Image (cartoon, grey):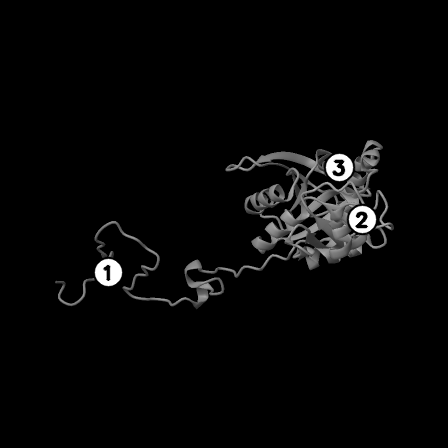
């Protein structure tokens, strides 16, 4: 079965996704010891490899790289919670990131901070599946990412985001690391799905204490499942019948040269010493010498 990797940063996000899987097995990456649980997603052709990678962009990039080389997933989904940045983004809403901004790149000058952001776009294939699965049930907007918990809507950072990343509707701490690692690998696509657990303001602690994080994580997990129910695995390239690997993937054995008489085909053969061919049951040639 084809594999999708789902990454989370918090245990409550991990548990929200795990609740949707069946036939779960434990996996350990042999070199670095990265742990995963892999299970089936009922009603889909997918196996899901679930990894609790921890918080922060650097950790996210490193663990994503491990997962890509270890499990070779067709797609990588980052599923979890985020803080909302817009008045029309409510606690409990789901945001699917069309674009991921790394907000801390820039130049500090006497005239202020000049943003020099990096940005990664979502996989077109995954975004098409998400739009079909979540139409009318999620916001498809950019998000901002930095190694910071934003809990002050009046701070200098909040103002900078409003000025330099005005279309970002949420902020969190891992997506840029995941998106960059997937971009460098060049095979799997990435999709970021976030449930809004607070408004990135002074009321963040109150919202968290009221149970907003588990609810937001559950909403994001349900959205991820809906996307995977819509997403189809990539088609497998057909292999030629009776192909000879020494002749290339598209050469049939019927195209190979044929030999008769006393010719012997030594292609691909190795011999530890001298080789002597002897005719068995055939009359000698000439005078028998």
Disc ID at residue 16: 3
Which quadrant does the C terminus fall into? bottom left
Regarding mark 2 in the picture, which secondary structure is present there?
A: loop
| Cα distance in 3D space between marks 1 and 2 | 90 Å
Nearest the camera: 78 or 276?
A: 78
Q: Secondary structure at mark 1?
A: loop
The one of 289 and 11 positioned closer to us in this rendering: 11
Q: Residue at x 54, y 59 (%)?
A: 239
Q: Is residue 123 left or right of residue 285?
A: right
In this picture, is 216 found above or below 233? above
Pair 2/3: label in front: 2
| Labelled disc at residue 85 | 2
Name the residue nearer the viewer: 8 or 144.
144
Q: Quadrant of residue 235?
A: bottom right
Q: Is residue 246 left or right of residue 178?
A: left
Whichever of labels 1 and 3 marks the residue nearer the N terminus, that label is 3
76 relative to 256, above or below? above
Residue picked out by circle 1: 282
* The image quarter in which residue 206 lies: top right
Q: Residue 249 at x, y = what percent?
A: 48, 62
């Amino acid at each position: 079965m084809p594999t999708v990797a789902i990454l989370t940063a918090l245990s409550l996000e991990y548990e929200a996704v795990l609740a949707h899987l069946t036939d779960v097995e434990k996996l350990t990456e042999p070199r670095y010891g990265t742990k995963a649980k892999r299970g089936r997603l009922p009603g889909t052709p997918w196996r899901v490899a679930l990894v609790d990678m921890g918080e922060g962009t650097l950790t996210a990039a490193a663990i994503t790289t491990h997962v890509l080389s270890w499990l070779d997933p067709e797609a990588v989904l980052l599923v979890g919670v985020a803080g909302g940045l817009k008045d029309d983004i409510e606690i409990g809403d789901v945001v699917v990131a069309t674009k991921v901004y790394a907000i801390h790149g820039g130049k500090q000058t006497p005239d202020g901070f000049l943003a020099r952001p990096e940005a990664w776009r979502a996989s077109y294939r995954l975004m098409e599946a998400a739009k079909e699965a979540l139409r009318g049930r999620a916001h498809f907007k950019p998000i901002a990412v930095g190694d910071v918990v934003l809990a002050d809507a009046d701070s200098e950072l909040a103002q900078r985001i409003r000025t330099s990343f005005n279309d970002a509707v949420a902020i969190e701490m891992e997506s840029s690391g995941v998106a960059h690692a997937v971009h460098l690998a060049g095979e799997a696509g990435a999709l970021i799905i976030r449930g809004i657990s607070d408004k990135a303001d002074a009321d963040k602690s109150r919202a968290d204490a009221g149970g907003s994080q588990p609810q937001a994580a559950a909403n994001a997990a349900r959205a991820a499942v809906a996307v995977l129910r819509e997403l189809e695995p990539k088609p497998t390239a057909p292999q030629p019948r009776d192909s000879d690997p020494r002749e290339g993937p598209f050469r049939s054995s019927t195209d190979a040269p044929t030999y008769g008489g006393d010719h012997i085909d030594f292609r691909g053969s190795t011999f530890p010493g001298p080789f002597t061919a002897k005719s068995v049951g055939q009359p000698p040639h000439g005078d028998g010498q």
